[in-house]
Amino acid sequence: MQNKKNQSSVGMMIQRCHKWRQKRKQYMDQARQTSDEIERERLMQAAEHYGRIVNAEQGKIDSTRDGRDKNAVIEDINDTADTTENVDTSDEDENVFPDFITNEK
């Protein structure tokens, strides 16, 4: 019973993260299109705010999932890759990508 509650909770957190990522992208796109420096800065700060919210929520999601769930997903991905492509993925397994990628320079 507790596991289903956690799954539902994690699902809602993922939905919120998705919504906030879209909002962040919207603000960044608006900032790129505006010529007013003050408005651009305000929009970029709003986008940064949503980025921080997403990072915090993603941390909660990651801490809620237990290691068994993560390993099961990784095994499913590896099994799918092995059956669909006959490619050596040993180099790819060593690469660890962050959950949230920013375009900061």
Image: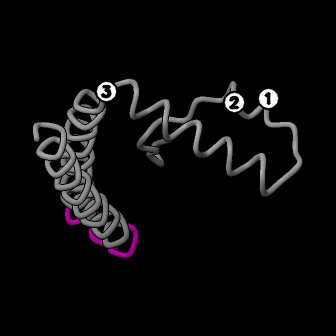
Magenta span main SS: helix
- Between disc 3 and disc 2, whose residue precedes? 3
Instruction: Tell me which amino acid carries mark 3.
Output: Asp
Labelled disc at residue 93: 2
Q: Position of residue 27 (x, y in %)?
A: 27, 66
Q: Secondary structure at mark 3?
A: loop
Closest to the camera, between mark 1 and mark 3, is 3
Query: Residues in magenta?
Result: 32-39
Q: Which residue is mark 1?
A: 90
Q: Is 92 left, or right, of 43 in this rendering?
A: right
Q: CA distance from mark 1 to mark 3?
A: 24 Å
Q: Is 61 above or below relative to 12?
A: above
Q: Nearer the viewer, residue 18 or 88?
A: 88
Residue visible at 66% across and 29% down?
95
Q: Is 5 one of the magenta-colored residues?
A: no
Check the image and report above or below for 26 versus 4: below
Are circles 1 and 2 on residues that touch, CB within 8 Å?
yes
Q: Is residue 77 left or right of residue 103?
A: right
Q: Is residue 81 above or below residue 64?
A: below
Which residue is most to the front?
1
**Residue identified by numbered label 3:** 66
Q: Position of residue 91 (x, y in %)?
A: 79, 29
Q: Residue at x 25, y 38 (%)?
A: 61
Judging depth in this view, the residue of 6 and 99 nearest the camera is: 6
Give the alpha-carbon distance from disc 1 to disc 2, as whole Å: 5 Å
